[in-house]
Amino acid sequence: QVQLVESGGGLVQAGGSLRLSCAASGSPFAFNAMGWYRQAPGKQRELVAQITNGRYTNYVDSVKGRFTISRDDAKNTVNLEMNSLKPEDTAVYYCNARSPYGTNYWGKGTLVTVSS
């Protein structure tokens, strides 16, 4: 059974930095893509950043230049380095992994709060 466990959320002041990590376990295959989504109160879940097994990366426009996604296939982890954080980055951040068969797996989420 595939499990994704996030860590690294918390409270930070605007302009600060946080690093989110996600560890995957129980997978018999390498994930085609791993990424981070977020959901702010009253808003839909949105893709923040994604990285494929070919290391192609994709970011939502609002975080380009501030966030960096990386993955370590040997450890089955994906990380999100978040710099110059803004209050509008406040949300629950979810780790996502997609199998070669198209199945999406989700973590339970970690809360990031950016104070102004």
Image (cartoon, grey):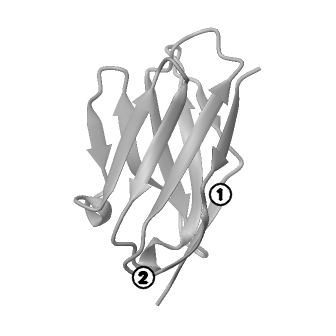
Is residue 51 visible from the viewing direction of this image?
yes
Residue 112 position in % (x across, y down): 57, 68
Check disc 1 and report its element: helix, strand or loop: strand
Residue sitting at 40 percent across and 53 percent down?
81
Kindly identify the residue that appears in the image at 37 percent across and 44 percent down: 69
Q: Name the residue at the right extreme.
A: 1
In the rendered image, which residue does mark 1 sit on?
110
Left-right relation of 97 to 33: right
Q: Nearer the viewer, residue 49 or 17?
A: 17
110 or 12: nearer the viewer? 12
**Do callouts 2 and 1 mark residues in contact (Cβ within 8 Å)?**
no
Specify the quadrant that holds the N terminus: top right
Look at 37% across and 21% down and name the residue there: 53
Going 53% across and 63% down the picture, which residue do you hit?
44
Amino acid identity at mark 1: Thr
* 66 versus 104 height, above or below: below
In the image, 88 versus 19, the foreground residue is: 19
Residue 68, placed above or below residue 31: below
Residue 14 is labelled as 2
What amino acid is found at the position of numbered circle 2 in the picture? Ala
